[in-house]
Image: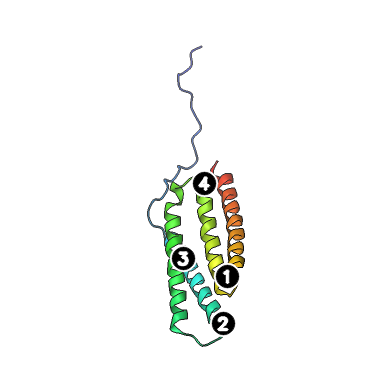
């Protein structure tokens, strides 16, 4: 009995869509929204119920812009990094931001550093778990 050299295979119900490499709305909207949140958070921590000054406003604006720029840059290059380094980068960004905001609240450098390191380690572990379980 002669059979054909190539056996028929099952086809997928739908074709795979290619990965989008361009700028999506979420790639800039999420860092922008997070930057606004961090900026307002820094402003309100420093304000502490007193009258608003120009320095407080500039602190909030600069904090928000720097965080949004770092977040945008990290989101743009994240797929070129190995998963361990990618998780560590997200942890460092989170820990650094929380440590900075904690220091604005009047906490000591040691307290702010420990809080930032603990949250950075937690975020890095969480992101590593997410990447490890979803990337195969």
Q: Residue at x 54, y 44 (%)?
A: 135
Q: Are marks 3 and 2 in contact (CB under 8 Å)?
A: no
Secondary structure beneath disc 2? loop
Residue, disc 1: 102
Residue that carries the numbered disc 4 in the rendered image: 83
Report crowding for label 4: few under 14, some 14 to 19, many 20 or more residues within 10 A (C-alpha).
some
| Near-viewer residue (113 or 124) | 113
The residue where tag 3 is placed is: 67
* Neighbours of disc 2 within 10 Å: few (<14), some (14-19), many (20+): few
Q: N-terminal of the two: label 4 or label 2?
A: 2
Find residue 18 and report its horizontal and vertical position in percent: 41, 45
Residue farthest bottom in this picture: 51
Near mark 1 (Cα within 10 A), the count class, few <14, some 14-19 or many ≥20, is many
As drawn, 74 above or below 67: above
Are the two marked residues, 2 and 1, in contact with CB atoms closer than 8 angstroms? Answer: no
In the rendered image, the quadrant that contains the C terminus is: top right
Of label 4 and label 3, which has the lower sequence position?
3
Task: Give the distance between the C-alpha atoms of the residues marked 3 and 2, in whole angstroms.
Answer: 22 Å
Query: Which marked residue is nearer to the observer: mark 1 or mark 4?
Result: 1
The residue lying furthest to the top in this view is 1
With respect to residue 54, does 81 lie above or below? above
């Amino acid at each position: 009995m002669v059979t054909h050299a190539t056996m028929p295979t099952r086809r997928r119900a739908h074709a795979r869509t290619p990965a989008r490499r361009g700028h999506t709305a979420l790639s800039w909207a999420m860092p922008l929204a997070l930057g606004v949140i961090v900026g307002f958070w820094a402003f309100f921590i420093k304000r502490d119920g007193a009258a608003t000054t120009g320095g407080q406003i500039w602190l909030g604006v600069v904090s928000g812009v720097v965080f949004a720029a770092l977040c945008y840059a990290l989101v743009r290059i994240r797929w070129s990094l190995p998963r361990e380094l990618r998780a560590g980068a997200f942890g460092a960004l989170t820990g650094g931001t929380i440590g900075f905001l904690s220091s604005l609240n009047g906490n000591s450098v040691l307290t702010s550093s420990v809080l930032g390191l603990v949250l950075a380690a937690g975020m890095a572990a969480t992101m590593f778990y997410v990447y490890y379980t979803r990337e195969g």
